[in-house]
Each structure stands twice: as structure tokens, then as C-alpha cells.
Image: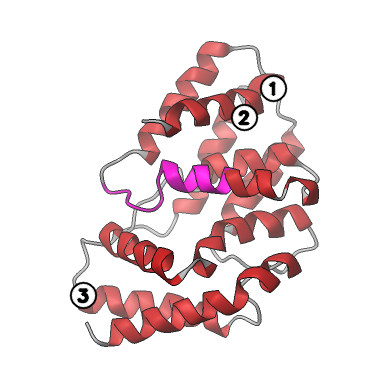
Amino acid sequence: MQLIPALKEQWLNLTAQYTTDEPLLLQEFDHLITHYSTINRFYHNLQHIHNLLLLQQQYEEMIHDHDTIGFAIFYHDLVYDVMKTDNEDESALAAGRFMQQTNVPVTQAEKIMEYIRATKSHDGNSTDNDLLLFLDFDMAILGSSSEEYQQYAQQIRMEYNSYNDTAYNMGRTKVLQHFLQMPHIYSTETFRNKYEQQARENINAELAALKTT
């Protein structure tokens, strides 16, 4: 897979200053790849991680702590089981276990784990601009073109293929309505200006489609 060499280079660049234990870094990278490559991942996969890293590069001048965001990107969907509600907590704990084996400062590790846990609610009520940017990176897909959004919606449905249409439509509708009820889907002015209107149009279109299935 073309993505893996690029992701490996980014992973090693991110982690090099925190440990010289190359076997540990390679073992952990394989661990990440294994989790993000499972057959039930149609959206929350390596491509998703790659896309967020591209956004990090695109908005690099707005970011204060690139390493914290980098670690959060790599780990935020490490654990992804549609039947469970503790994925973000488990992903944060996995990140913490790795960082305990490195020289990542404890305060930074706690911050990274906080970022990962924040993806559960995407509550933009924070004064940490890096956290707000990270959350907006994760939500950027909602404001993509209608074609890209439709593909995303199909991929999410495939990840929840263990649910019948009635159960899925009910749960998905609740999630989408939650987004629409938020004062702003995006936490930063930059992303609101670029994506907010399109995101709301996409979500309304998906809600309408769910009513017909």
C-alpha cells in the first residue's frame, strides 16, 4: 500500500526525538497499521489518518504544538468498535501506554490523551486553539463536496453493517441532528468560514436520504 511508507516516515519523524528505541517504534507502527487496516474499516482507516496529517501540514502555520496534534491524529481512532461506546477512552489509553515507554513528558502525554477523548463529543468549548484545530480536522469531511460526502456516508454505513436499516437510520439521524443543533459544527473561524455551510447542506441531504430508506 502506497500510504504505509509515507505514514511510516511521518511516524518516525514524529517519534524520533522521544526515544532511540527503533524496535519499539517499528513495533508500535505495525500495531497502528494492524488496527487501522482491519476489514471492517471503510472510513476510519489509514486513509483517514493520512487525510488528517495532510490537513495538519496545510494549516501548519496556525498550529503551536505539532507533536501533540500528530500523536492525537495517529491514535484517535486506534480502537474502533461500533458496538462499544468507550473507543475514545481505549484509544487514549493505548496512546498513553506507548508514551510511557518514551520520553514524552507526562504533561504532554496527558494533553494528547485529552485530545483523543475530545473526539467523542467534539465539544469545541476550549481555549486551546490546537485542540480546536484538531477537532476541525476530524470533522472536515462533513464540509467536503456532495460527492465526497456521499461516499463518506456510504463508508460509515458499511462500518455499521451489523445494524439493520431501522436501527442504523435511527442512530445516524440522532448523530446528524446533534451536529445541526450545535451553534457551530466547526470550532475555529477558519473552518467555519470554509466548511460550515456545505457541512450543513450535506447533513440535511443525508437526513433526507435516511427518511427514504
In the foreground, 8 or 115: 8
Task: Please state, as top left, top right, bottom left or bottom right, where the C terminus lies in the image.
Answer: bottom left
Query: Where is 179 relative to 132, above or below?
Result: below
Where disc 3 sits, the SS reads helix
Q: Which residues are magenta?
A: 40-53
Left/right of residue 111 with respect to residue 25 in the rendered view: right
| Magenta segment includes 52 | yes
> Would you say the residues marked 1 and 2 are in contact, meaning their CB atoms lie under 8 Å apart?
yes
Residue at 29% x, 57% y: name it. Answer: 159
Residue 91 seen in this snapshot? no
From the viewer's perspective, is 181 left or right of 203? right
Structural distance between the alpha carbons of marks 3 and 2: 40 Å
Q: What residue did someone put label 1 on?
A: 18
State the separation of the CA atoms marked 1 and 2.
Answer: 9 Å
- Which structural element holds mark 1? helix
Q: Which residue is mark 3?
A: 165
